[in-house]
Image (cartoon, rainbow, N blue to C red):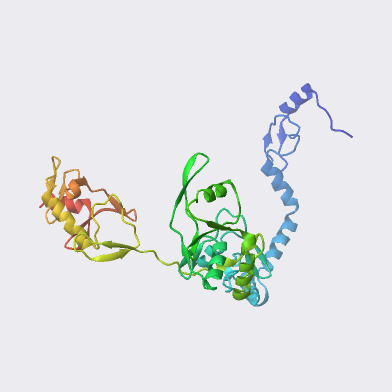
Amino acid sequence: MGKKSYTQTEKEEYEKIEKTCKFCGEKFYKVWSKYSLSEFCSQSCSRKYSSRLKREYVNKKISDSLKNYYKTNNRPISVIKKEEYYQNPNKCCICGKVIEYESRKNKTCSRKCNSKCANLTKQKNGTVFVENGQPRSKSGHYKGFYCSSTYELVYYIYMTEHGHEVIRNTKTYDYVFDGKNKIYIPDFRVDGKLVEIKGYNSRQVKAKIESVKDEDIKILYYKDLSDMMDYVDKKYGTKHTRHANNYFILYDEDKPEKLFEYTCDICGKKFKSKWKRNKKSNFTVCSMECKLKIRKTMSKNQTTHIPDGFHQIPTLDGYYMNEEKKIWSNWDGGRYVKLSKIKGVYERYSLRKDKKQKWYTPDELFNMTFNK
């Protein structure tokens, strides 16, 4: 039997009839629709009425679940599951250490292993493989020598262990690709000859090779490295296929720190720094003491115009303050000192005096200057 069809007059009469809710007993009127021919004033009353009929079943289900929360000897399920996990725990796919219960869903045991395990997608016979064709190749340092890919790593290991001299090439070549000027740097110099390692061939690779005209260059692809890969697999226990390999585990754990050598312009001392010198800076200094000497000489030699309304802050040479609690400094030709916050609580100014770091609030500096 099909659904009953209502006429327009029957719909209007339905809307005029006063109804009584079957659950709460309140009277209501309802606009007609094909879903509104019900005995309840709202959806919540309808659900409460249906759950009331099944209350005994619902209570029993909740009771059973709470009773099963505790098993033998009143021990929570979480404790029992933790003990069961450590009977056969998951192990790190990089170093093989046991992964803690709280991190049981992870593949690695630490951040260091996770960085090595980046972009890993396959695992065969307990050995993790890297999916070939990732947007970035796996680079790293092997005995202090930088390799930009695992193919370069295999080539470097094989050639050095067979008595060849392998160094990084620094000579550059200019070439044009898609109307843009670019620079090409071949990978290695082996016994004085240029060698390039490539995993694929493309139009850009051809443009790079054609730019080398003054000497011969040797290009090696996957087929040329297959014997070298077999040699590394037998000696170091690694594995490889045409589309994947795990040679990245041979990289050094600690990356060697690159240091830059400089000479101090004040005391003449030679020093090393991991930060590259900024080309915009006029001086190179080895310590904060030499930097302060430059500032003092510059402040004495330069005559800066101090804005109106600023007064010298006592015991702080070269710093001025106005009644709006703004600070002006004549260091480096004159500038405003910006406000800085510590943990978002106090606004302080960091000023140096007598080689010690001192912190002042704006109120303290104001009292030192105006309320002497």
Q: Is residue 9 above or below residue 178?
A: above
Residue 364: give x, y in percent of width and height.
19, 54
Left/right of residue 327 with respect to residue 138 in the rendered view: left
**Residue at 15% across / 52% down in the picture?**
298
Q: Nearer the viewer, residue 224 or 238?
A: 224
- Can residue 24 be seen in the rendering of this structure? no
Occupied quadrant, residue 86: bottom right
Residue 237: give x, y in percent of width and height.
62, 74
Left/right of residue 71 with respect to residue 338 in the rendered view: right
Q: Nearer the viewer, residue 78 or 75?
A: 78
Q: Quadrant of the N terminus?
A: top right
Occupied quadrant, residue 218: bottom right
Left/right of residue 226 with respect to residue 289 in the rendered view: right
Q: Residue furthest top?
A: 9
Residue 10: give x, y in percent of width and height.
79, 24
Left/right of residue 61 with respect to residue 365 in the rendered view: right
